[in-house]
Image (tube, grey):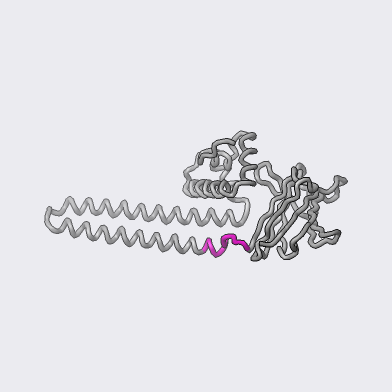
Amino acid sequence: MIETTDITLRRWLLHTLPADEAAILEQQLLTDEDFGERLRAAEADLLDDYARGNLAADENAVAAERFAATARDRLRVRIARALARITQRSSERLDVARHRRHGLAERMDRSGRRARVRRIAAVGVLASACALVVAVIGLNQRMTTLNPPRTDAETTITLLADSQRGANARRIELPRSAAMLRLQAEVDGSDPNAHYALSIDDDGRTVFSASGIGVRESGAYRFVEVALDARKLAAGSHRVNVVAEGSAQPASTWILETQSK
């Protein structure tokens, strides 16, 4: 286990971590939910620095590629840049207000006029702060609307290559409130143009099938992903089959033992 500092996480996100250390973190990401939260926080910090132009040239190039991968990532960049502009404008207005206060103070004597200037400046700062809060709240509400937080209505299951063929049947609990199941299965992925078919069988009866599935990547982890109605998996045993289309290789299989909670 390596020490997962904020610097380590950023190096991983920027692909500058040695391959052996990156592999350890990738495995930890699959098994440690708290680690996943830390990684998302590190990614948010990286996004903020990218939006503000605070990265070195090589880091900026990697971040630009990372945050242009999907429409959701591109939206996150636009929102982060909007927040950065709002913060910058507020800072500039405060600087102007301080400069004006300094000029006024030099022209005024030590009478009650100086106290009046302080009151006026405080009102201006408060107004700027209120405007910033309103803008941030509005953008956060928009972000929440476009990307609602996950709840028990969505459950994700990850099937790794070393747990195939029922050697260790994967037992899971599906919340009764689960409406959608997101199923990920690790594949070889050496051919980036390969497509896969995934099916789920119950006692020889196919309850779900999908074909033409492209390979996705997360570091060294290559997988295919499908989403299905969680109600298709009643309590019991299920066989998951994944095969590369047009390949003579045998299918990869996993056994899922599900129960409701």
| Residue pictured at 78% horizontal, 50% vertical | 254
For the C terminus, the quadrant is: bottom right
Task: Where is residue 109? Give x, y as percent.
Answer: 12, 53
| Residue pictured at 71% horizontal, 55% vertical | 183
| Residue pictured at 59% horizontal, 49% vertical | 33
Task: Where is residue 4? Give x, y as percent.
Answer: 54, 39
Establish if 10 lies above or below 260: above
Task: Where is residue 137? Give x, y as percent.
Answer: 45, 62
Task: Where is residue 232? Give x, y as percent.
Answer: 75, 64
Q: Does the magenta stretch include residue 48?
A: no
Drawn side of residue 117 relative to residue 15, left or right: left
Work out which residue is located at the far right of the displayed protein and give it.
248
Drawn side of residue 176 relative to residue 88, left or right: right
| Residue pictured at 52% horizontal, 56% vertical | 78
Q: Is residue 146 magenta?
A: yes
Instruction: Determine if residue 155 is in view.
Output: yes
For the N terminus, the quadrant is: top right
Quadrant of the image occupied by residue 132: bottom left
Count of marks overlaid on the render? 0
Camera-side residue of 245 and 201: 201
Establish if 242 lies above or below 143: above
Instruction: Determine if residue 211 is in view.
Output: no
- Looking at the rendering, the stretch of residues picked out in magenta corresponds to 142-152
Camera-side residue of 117 and 223: 223
Drawn side of residue 243 relative to residue 221, left or right: right
